[in-house]
Amino acid sequence: MSGNDTSQALAESIKKLRTSQKMTQSGLASKAQLSTSFISQLERGNTDVTFSTLTRLCAALGTTIGHLFPADQPSGRIVRFDEYRHLDYNGVDKYVLTREEMADVDVCLFDFPPGSSTGTRVPPGVDRTELWICLTEYLGIDIGSDVHFLKAGDSFDFASDRTNTVYNPGPNSSRALLVIKNHKK
């Protein structure tokens, strides 16, 4: 990060913390014993800050200096197919593609042999939505008495609050992707 990028990141962190606490610039200035115009300039990235001033700002915001500087984020992480967590789900191969850190979403790849099924799936007791995407061949999804058939490229989403069964109704192996969105209560 260049010096200018660091100043801008610091400015954004201070403003975000201040506004998340529903504090005005004037309120922060008063708590940190600084001027409101200084806080305004700082949040726009138009001024530098000394260590002692930064320490006062952190005390006023109830945080640490380290928290104000975001860590460099990697551009991404590759997870190879042989690293996926594999589960045998009633004879259906289930591969969990997402990492544990991604708590609000799960992505799973399913390989359905001909005529195979997940079996009856009961509601998990958590508020979530499922999105099934048929990648190859066909996929059947029964929810209660409703029957849905998908062909390659089709998708179907539903709330996971009803008993359901997902299966391969065709004579060939099929592949499907499941995206689960966990909702916070």
Image (cartoon, grey):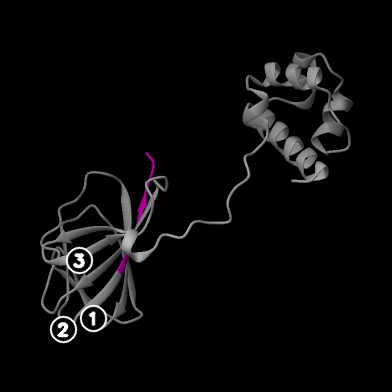
Q: Which amino acid does label 2 sit on?
A: Gly
> Dot 3 corresponds to which residue?
93
Q: What element carries label 2?
A: loop
Disc 1 crowd, CA 10 A, few/some/many (<14, 14-19, 20+): many
Position in image of residue 83 (x %, y %): 33, 59
Position in image of residue 28 (x %, y %): 75, 21
Q: Residue at x 23, y 52 (%)?
A: 161
Mark 2 and mark 1 in contact (Cβ < 8 Å)?
yes
Position in image of residue 143 (x %, y %): 18, 64
Looking at the rendering, the stretch of residues picked out in magenta corresponds to 177-185
Q: Which residue is drawn at 80% across and 19% down?
A: 53
Q: Which residue is drawn at 88% across and 37% down?
A: 46
Helix, strand or loop: magenta stretch? strand
Q: Is residue 129 left or right of residue 90?
A: right
> Dot 1 corresponds to which residue?
138
- Compared with 146, 44 (above or below) is above
Mark 3 and mark 1 in contact (Cβ < 8 Å)?
no
Q: What residue type is labelled 1?
A: Tyr
3 or 2: mark nearer the eye:
3
Q: Nearer the viewer, residue 184 or 78?
A: 78
Cα distance, mark 3 to mark 2? Answer: 17 Å
Cα distance, mark 1 to mark 2? Answer: 6 Å
Q: Is mark 3 on a helix, strand or loop?
A: strand
> Dot 2 corresponds to which residue?
170
